[in-house]
Image: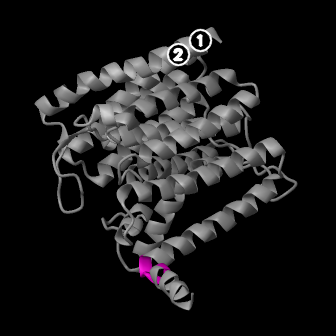
Amino acid sequence: MEVGVLGSFLVPLSSMLAAFGFLPLAHRLGFVDHPNGRKQHAAPVPLAGGGVVFVGLMVAGLATGLWNGEGWGWFLTAAVILTTVGTLDDIYDLSARWRFLIQGVTVALACAVSGVYINSLGLLLGDSVLLLGGFFGLVFTLVCALACINAYNMIDGIDGQAGSVTLITLAGVAVLSTVSGHQGTGLFAGLSCLALLVYLMFNLEVPWLRGRKMFLGDGGSNLLGFLVLWLVVLGSQRDGSFAPIVAVWLVGVPILDMLAVFMRRTLSGRSPFSADRTHIHHLLLDHGFSARQALLVVVAMHAAMVGFGVVGTLAGWSELTLTVGTFVAGGLYFSLSFLLGTGRLTALVAASRTER
């Protein structure tokens, strides 16, 4: 309890101090995001958010003693490398090939040496546990990690979005880990939420912080994606805090949005990694939603998914039920994305109003 109280004070304090230190430094070094045709901010914005969150995570790990725990040193090492690579990408615009290579090698080594990787998919088919084995488990974990890291990079498209969905996921992990008796992991996830709250206050420019806006940058989104991946794999595999299928519910909207975008680009004959405005927040903005309204819609959808996974676990729902639910949720999300992308949702709404 004392650790929790101390961490609840030190984590936001350290993140706040880091923010006030990094903001002027980023301006001085020119480490800022410049506006262009695809970005809506009017002036250069410091890319200091990743550093602010990282400092908070460092203090959270120290407060809970997790950095001395089994495997956590490898998480910290990988987090430093991935954040650094993302930061270099912000500065030098690294090629996707080099970025994926470094991310893949880093994650593969961290997971292989620490033993934190996906070895079991649980009772997906009903009665038998679906085991992957060491090699295939590592390969599957690597694919999931690259997907998660880059999904969080892609979802970082409007103010508050990446930080908010990550905060909701971490809150879900905190609840499930604590209830299952893994207080250390649960406390770390909860304290990490406080670091994210500090970043969000600056990113969303709450009234007393106007003029001190910051973005995560690729370094920050890489860090959040890897943090989420590590915690859901740890919770679903080594800790056993929740079933593997619940990890899908906890990751939620970022993965569904990435899959929907990749599918749409591929079907139109373009590279899945090409740039466009087909992410869910772009589609909502193009349909007349304000940035804050689009944020609320995305956050509500993600909270519903995380909440479903948490409630289902606590209520003891079968893994088969949760698996079927993921297909239903995915179908609903893809349908919404398709309707927004083709403009048919607007037409349906207009038609319903006409009928009234």
Q: Residue at x 67, y 48 (%)?
A: 307
> Where, quadrant-wise, is the N terminus in this rendering?
top right
Tell me: 331 left or right of 77: right
Residue 233 drawn at (x, y percent): 62, 39
Residue 315 drawn at (x, y percent): 82, 45
Q: Residue furthest bottom?
A: 355
**Callout 1 secondary element:** helix
Figure check: 16 above or below 311:
above
Tell me: 169 left or right of 327: left
Q: Residue at x 59, y 11 (%)?
A: 3
Callout 2, which amino acid? Gly
Q: Residue at x 83, y 52 (%)?
A: 318
Disc sitting over residue 242 in the figure: none
Figure check: 169 above or below 267:
above
Query: To which residue does mark 2 refer?
Result: 7
Tell me: 92 left or right of 287: left
Q: Main SS type for the magenta part? A: helix
Assess whether residue 122 is covered by the magenta stretch: no
**Callout 2 secondary element:** helix
Query: To which residue does mark 1 refer?
Result: 3
Q: Which segment did they paint magenta?
A: 341-345
Q: Residue furthest front?
A: 356
Q: Residue at x 44, y 74 (%)?
A: 264
Callout 1, which amino acid? Val
Q: Are marks 2 and 1 in contact (CB under 8 Å)?
A: yes
